Amino acid sequence: MKAPDNRLGIWLMVATVACYAIQDGLSRHLAGAYNVLLVVMIRYWFFAAFVVALALARGGRGGVPATRQLALHGLRAALHVGEISLIVASFVLVGLINTHAVFSACPLIIAALSGPVLGERVGWRRWTAIGLGLAGVLVILRPGSDLFAPAALLPLTAATMFALYSLLTSRATRVEPAFTAFFWSGILGAVAATLAGIWFWEPMGARDWALMVANGAVAVLSSWLMIRCYAVAEAGAVQPFAYLQLVFVAILGIAVFGERLETGTVSGAAIVTAAGIFTLLRTRALARARPG
């Protein structure tokens, strides 16, 4: 078995989150002109084409991986489509920077929900980090202040939905290969996104079609880069670098969309990021120490 190449993996992770930031900027622009569900639907068409191409490249029975967990994959797909729709809406209503600052609490929510969903034990160290991280979210949201609006809860709701999606993916991959979960998430997600978004179809000019295609292409590229990243490197070595997406998004938000970097957002994001990285590293350490 080939030894992990963590240095290459880190660079692949940096490239992945840079692509995610570009994708988010494109989604933010398009959702300002078209219905969010329409934007998400077209993006999912590209994702579905990508997973079908991967399945055909892998071969097998018609290239389609069989599953005995179709209902579970359907629930995962619905959560993922809902999460993406909420976060794209949040880009428009709350801004790229504030959305990602709050969404960075996702690893903490995953840790908090891993007990009831997966039956895992969460020790006092991680519960402390979770508490501190959620306090950081409150610093960002500033409930009770003039800056707070109900739309500010959209990224927190999206983060919770993605956490549930991630935990259900973990459950699904206990009995089936990871690619099976990836494939059915793309296919069923495309079906769900189409059923929701087709009602908002409207004609688009050549420029906007080009941006829609670019959005889908970048989504495919980021997915491919992520797959390559985890194929060559140890997850624990590269995962902390995913937080660089906050930096890329901040640059994009300020330079392209004229957003402001508030002191409370920076402070809260720093708290959430530190708590999230600690939780990730602690979870990885416990997994390595676990027998078997």
Image (cartoon, rainbow, N blue to C red):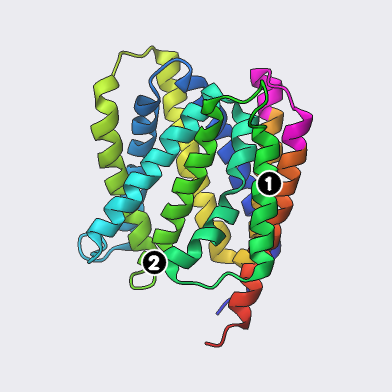
The label on residue 68 is: none
The correct choice, above or below, for 44 with respect to 29 in the image is below
Residue 237 x, y percent position in the rendering:
67, 64
| Residues at marks 1 and 2, CA–CA distance in whole angstroms | 29 Å
Query: Would you name the residue on which mark 2 appears?
Result: 171
Relative to the observer, which residue lies in front, 233 or 68? 68
Query: Would you name the residue on which mark 1 appears?
Result: 135
Residue 144 x, y percent position in the rendering:
64, 28
Quarter of the picture holding the N terminus:
bottom right
Q: What residue sits 71% from the left and 23% below the top? A: 254
**Amino acid type, callout 1:** Ala
In the rendered structure, which segment of residues is drawn in magenta? 252-266
The correct choice, above or below, for 130 with respect to 43 in the image is below
Apparent side of residue 142 relative to residue 56 in the rendered image (left or right): right
User: Which of the 4 quarters of the picture holds residue 21?
Assistant: top right
Q: What residue sits 52% from the left and 27% below the top? A: 150
Q: Is residue 265 magenta?
A: yes
Relative to the observer, which residue lies in front, 35 or 205? 35
Q: What residue sits 29% from the left and 28% below the top? A: 197
Dot 2 falls on a residue whose secondary structure is helix
Q: Is residue 191 magenta?
A: no
